[in-house]
Image (cartoon, grey):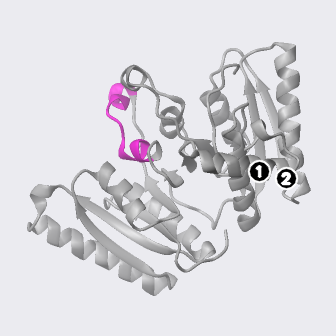
Amino acid sequence: MTKDKHKAILVPLDFTDVADYALDHGLSIAKIFGYKLYLLHVLSNRHKGSEKEREAEERLNKIAEQVRKEHKLDVLTQLSYGNAYDTILEKADLFHVDFVVMGVHGKKGVSHLVKSQPYKVACRSQVPVLVVKEQHHHVGFHNIVVPIDFSKRSAQKIAQAQKFARFFGAQIRVFGFLSSENKAKIINKEALLKSVTDFFVRNDIAVTTDLMINPRMSWPDALIAFADKVNADLIMIVAETGNRFQEIFSKNYTEQILDDVNIPVLTILPCREDLVAEAEAISSKEGVISPFVDPLGFFARAADI
């Protein structure tokens, strides 16, 4: 990630506290990477020409002006109409942004049946989505958890984690989980984690490695527990969509993590075939076993966890 004045971050704002937290995180990244900011507010079509439209426009412009004055950043505003989910994805594509930074409200009980906008965006966006719930208390990210499984998508995660670690001077926490106590699976998992750890060591990035084995825990619960234990300030995962039956009756891993964790989560959609090829080329060149790694930061449910 080189500083590039043409690169940008999209921050949807609904003028709530969590949207303010998202803006705070977006500002931090924009200042470090030298990105411009797009501030987006979405209204329903029925509010066109209304007093609510005028108030929203004034509020959006006031926030933008304050950011320009206090942070010296290039800020653009966009007031749009329609479905928030579709509009965010549309504007992210239109503005060619590199990140979407969104605030999310916690959900409880059966309320997960109504999908949150951040969850929908995270599972459909073609660029990384940083989902936050709380205020940012420091600049950047310094303790990043990278969960690793046996999928090719883990390759993309490693390259993105490497970029973040270099920019923020962060420590990477490579994390693996098994719900099985089968010795062969444990040996394979340990070998995988070692290959990933060696990659970071060769690239002069501080790294630790942990493997949790617990038949009574789910993968998301294990990940969240580990992130809390090491005081992580960012988790990098792959967003998964799940089938319709699953979305109606149960939370998939992405949704469960976004619901239950309080630290920022960087989610990325499983990448296109050209990016998979790029990830495998990077991993092969660096001496990491290609099915074990991935450069944009992913996480997938494996059959043997």
Can residue 126 be seen from the camera position used here? yes
Q: Are marks 1 and 2 in contact (CB under 8 Å)?
A: yes
**Whole-percent x, y for residue 243 in the image:** 43, 25
Q: Quadrant of the N terminus?
A: bottom right
> What's the residue type where badge 2 is placed?
Lys
102 or 150: which is nearer to us?
Answer: 150
Q: Quadrant of the C terminus?
A: top right
Q: Secondary structure at mark 2?
A: helix
Can residue 235 be seen from the camera position used here? no
Q: Which residues are magenta?
A: 109-121
**Whole-percent x, y for residue 136 in the image:** 55, 61
The answer to if 118 sits in the magenta stretch is yes
**Which image quadrant for residue 188?**
top right
- The residue at the point 48 percent across, 65 percent down is 97
Q: Residues within 10 Å of mark 1 (few under 14, many from 20)?
A: some
Between the C-alphas of marks 1 and 2, the distance is 6 Å
Q: Does the magenta stretch mainly form a helix, a strand or a loop? A: helix
- The residue at the point 66 percent across, 40 percent down is 153
The label on residue 285 is 2
The answer to if 61 sits in the magenta stretch is no
- The residue at the point 31 percent across, 62 percent down is 15
**Which image quadrant for residue 42?**
bottom left
**Whole-percent x, y for residue 201 in the image:** 89, 53
* Residue occupied by mark 1: 281
**Whole-percent x, y for residue 16 in the image:** 34, 57
Up the image or down, 238 lies above or below 126; here it is: above
The label on residue 143 is none
Q: Secondary structure at mark 1?
A: helix
Left or right position of 131 against 244? right
- The residue at the point 49 percent across, 52 percent down is 126
